[in-house]
Amino acid sequence: GDSTPIISSEETLASLKTAVSDLVSLNVPVVFPTETVYGLAAPALISSAVSQIFTTKGRPADNPLIVHVSSPEMLKSILPSSFVIPSSYNLLMQAFWPGPLTLLFPATPQIPSIITASRDTVAIRMPSHPVARALIQMCNTPLAAPSANTSGSPSPTKAEHVLHNLFGKVRVILDGGPCDVGLESTVVDGLSSDGAIRVLRPGGVTVEDMERVLAVGGVTPKILVHRRDFRDEGLENAPTTPGMKYAEVELNWDYFPLGTVDEPSLTAQRLFDGLLTLERNGVDLIIVEGVEEAREGLAVMNRVRKAAGESGNALNRGMQGLWTS
Ligand code: TXA
Ligand code: MG
């Protein structure tokens, strides 16, 4: 609950206060750590603050944002008063909140349309990272936040990734260390009248874990997985480089270990760091060994495909290729 003191260090508290002042007094976005990836936050109920997220990221306006809350009370304060939380949501929230699970709820007029991209639903999650929780709690208002990267590059999982990618574009970056999960939250729509649970984006909470929790709770909805994010930030448009060129250059190999194929959660944690680190080292081609699309492997392969723009010709040979410029 919100009464638990989360942050003990004076230095952390001072940094948090600076971030809170930027957010609630100046209404400018700040970067904060979550357990999934770093986020670029603005007060969710202030449209002009949220619009700065879009300009900072170069994000298309038709891609809706996730709203982050720190308590059940804060969640209720932005839901329609008449809305009855479905039993599937109660089970999922009990099991996975705070944590890497985002749920769609009906939007009220209080939620700026810039957040929902004028949809009638709003995506909400309660992050577990102590700095994220403290920040939202101290702001005492929900924060809208996409991943803290310019549109089109992999999400940052370390403060240094943000520093390289958004240098000069944000005033405050709260460094909370490397992200535990390393991939974005699972986005779930359980609002449809057919009672099905639709996984719009696989992520930190696995389909297997959700199935188990729902079954234990006596709810057995159909779980439908959309293997491709219906709308994300244009990584699919990553430039491709013709393989022919490599005949003329000397290849130097650089390795970034992602763990073994039977540790998908470790691979998830390291994937974006690997892509960003290799890209920064100036490599021309990244080859990622494929993993089974089960547990965290489902989200891992979803992000690898997105990074490869589904176009890498290695895709059909069990190896996933990411072409970078
Ligand atoms: O882990 C995460 O979710 C991170 C951290 C910062 O919380 N955030 C994140 O945000 O990944 P972003 O903006 O990069 O991705 C949000 C995803 C997009 O795929 C977006 O289309 C989807 O959530 N989304 C947001 N609102 C939605 C809505 N109303 N209906 C359907 N999809 C929605
Ligand atoms: Mg993103």
Image (spheres, rainbow, N blue to C red):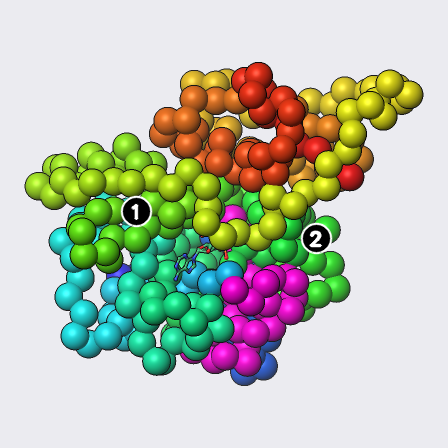
Q: Residue at x 60, y 73 (%)?
A: 52
Residue 165, numbered circle: 2
188 to the left or right of 320: left
Q: Nearer the viewer, residue 196 or 145?
A: 196
Q: Nearer the viewer, mark 1 or mark 2?
A: 1
Q: Mark 1, residues whose alpha carbon is within 10 Å: few (<14), some, or many (≥20)?
A: some
Task: From the top left corner, tell me how far across and down residue 155 is, in percent.
Answer: 58, 47
User: Where the N terminus falls, by quadrant?
Assistant: bottom left
Q: Which residues are magenta?
A: 35-62
Task: From the top left corner, tell me how far across and down residue 35 is, in percent.
Answer: 45, 47
Residue at far right of view: 248
Above or below, 260 against 161 in this view is above
The secondary structure type at the circle numbered 1 is strand
Q: Residue at x 60, y 62 (%)?
A: 59
Q: Name the residue beneath numbered marker 1.
A: 198
Instruction: Using the rendered image of the protein, determine whether residue 6 is visible from the camera's viewpoint.
Output: no
